[in-house]
Image (cartoon, grey):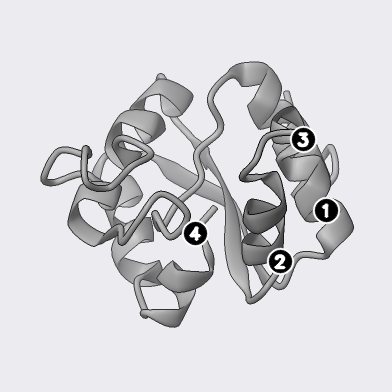
Amino acid sequence: MIKPEGVERGLIGEIIGRFERKGFKIVALKLSKISRETAEKQYEEHRGKDFFENLVSYISSAPTVAMVIEGENAIATAREMAGATNPKLAKPATIRGDYGIDVQRNIIHASDSEEAAKREIALHFGNVYIE
């Protein structure tokens, strides 16, 4: 998912292009402003943590781009391409390393496991793209 600041800064094409140039196929793509309820479900594993409220408020504050990518080792590679959660610690040539501002405004969300990917895909696209 490209977070609100990535959309606002016009980075959609650049980020999608990085995944395509890496050989991934974009099989679903949706620009939308997600509801607070969906945002809470998206980040359910962080409920009760001190940053949960700010994260939910932020991700539901403006449009995001949700996408489903296909390809070999898609989850691990997408996370590697995203870079460290904190852009200050992310390596150059990663999405967060190149464009991230801070931990909250770090440009992109990438599922961290197959289970999370399935849950998040279902949340944003239904079960159409889950195998």
The earlier-in-sequence mark between 1 and 2 is 1
SS state under label 4: loop
Residue to which mark 1 is pinned:
38
**Which residue is located at x 63 percent, y 53 percent?**
55
**Which residue is located at x 33 percent, y 49 percent?**
20
The type of residue carrying mark 2 is Ser
The earlier-in-sequence mark between 3 and 1 is 1
**Res. 18 visible in picture:** yes
Residue to which mark 4 is pinned:
2
Q: Which of the numbered marks, if any, corresponds to residue 47?
A: 3
In whole angstroms, how far apart are the C-alphas of marks 3 and 1? Answer: 13 Å
- Rate crowding at label 4 as few (under 14), some (14 to 19) or many (20 or more) other CA atoms within 10 Å: many
**Which residue is located at x 76 percent, y 65 percent?**
34
In whole angstroms, how far apart are the C-alphas of marks 4 and 3? Answer: 21 Å
- Rate crowding at label 3 as few (under 14), some (14 to 19) or many (20 or more) other CA atoms within 10 Å: few
**Left or right, 114 with reference to 42:** left
**Which residue is located at x 27 percent, y 50 percent?**
95
**Up-down: is 62 above or below 112?**
below
The earlier-in-sequence mark between 1 and 4 is 4
